[in-house]
Amino acid sequence: MDILFEDDFDLNKIADCGQCFRWEFQNGVYRFVYREYVLDIQQMPGLPDHFRVSCGAREWEDIWKNYFDMNRNYSKIRNRCTGTQLPLVLSSVPSDNGNRSASNQEISSHGGNACEVITAQTFLDRAVKAGTGIRILRQDPWEMLITFIISQRKNIPAIRKAVQLLAQTYGHPIGDTGSFSFPLPEDLRDVTAENLRELGLGYRAPYVRCAAQRVLDGRLNFDELQKLPDEELFSELMQVEGVGKKVANCVCLFGFSRTARSPVDVWISRAIDLCGGADPFPAFGDAAGIVQQYVFYFMKHPQR
DNA sequence: GACCAGGTGGCCT
DNA sequence: AGGCCACATGGT
């Protein structure tokens, strides 16, 4: 089935902005997995708004439209969040080191860093522009909890590998797609922390074991958590061993679609420093998490 | 072979 | 409340 998207939708950025670790890319086609569903999706060459998906209209409406957060207007949010007035804080950011002018190459080859001084708002505006096309996926809360527990002190390729291994080992094949489901708490009922260590999870293994146990014995109930306001949801998630502020906020944002939450990791922490030291994200209210995500992408792709 | 990665919990002032 | 530190492992 072919679809025309009117709003922001850049598959490269959606996949590569550090929110999702279960996508694959092959021959121009992206694959996403949600619970028992697998979607292959590709942008039609030369037609930026046209996409071809492997599912029919029914599955798109029932599953994937929600997964891709298609009921939210991202271009409107971008317009509302740029050009606003923040306190004037000057910061030096590395300037466009992706260009290939001879003089810049010379500077960087001698270890020097060309910098320019801009305001925090200019920095944020550039980040939003660079991240245009990102959408915050509505992923499975349990999968987000485990994934972001695993994510701590790992880089993104390592997270992808660990999550993939976890699915291959304790999930199950989905039809004949070659993809695997993410293991449910029941799938981990008889899996020990030692078993999980064998996957290379290191000190995170008992955290994953503990999270599964909390769901199995009813102390963690995702249907109940859905009903809680942001702050209470956040505190409940913080009760899980190995879940601190950052992971709890990631689960709120990516698993419960709480876009007012803005996780602070090492990259966002650097961005906050560039903005003068005060966290600028909460001021964006319900869009805080979305702006944060644009900035996270921008920090990792400064040349765009 | 350093250094770092979408951090957290515990212990110390 | 805030500053250190160990923690397991793999990517660059």
Image: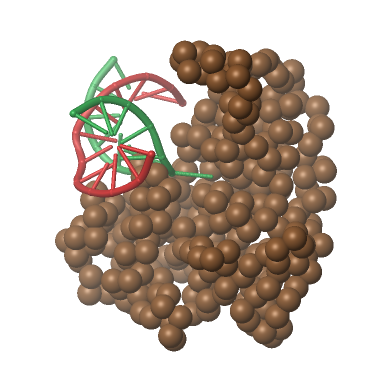
Chain colours: A brown, B green, C red
Depicted A216 relative to depicted A164: above or below:
below
Where in the figure is residue C12, as x and y percent of width and height? 38, 39
On the image, the x and y values in percent for residue A106 come to 54, 15
For the view shown, which residue lies furthest in the front direction?
A102
Q: Position of A179 compared to A270: left or right?
A: left
Residue A272 occupies quadrant: top right
Q: Residue at the location (74% across, 26% down)? A: A122
Please state which of residues A8 and A84 is positioned toward the viewer in this rendering.
A8
- The percent coordinates of residue A135 (x first, y second) are 66, 55
Residue drawn at 52 percent across, 49 percent down: A18
Q: Nearer the viewer, residue A146 or A238?
A: A146
Quadrant assignment for the C terminus of chain A: top right
Please name whichever residue, A77 or A15, is drawn nearer the observer in this view of the structure: A15
Residue A120, image x and y in percent?
69, 24
Answer yes or no: is residue A240 visible.
no
Q: How many marks?
A: 0
Quadrant containing the N terminus of chain A in the rendered view = bottom right
Direction from residue A136 to residue A168 in the image, left or right:
left
A214 sits to left or right of A88 = left
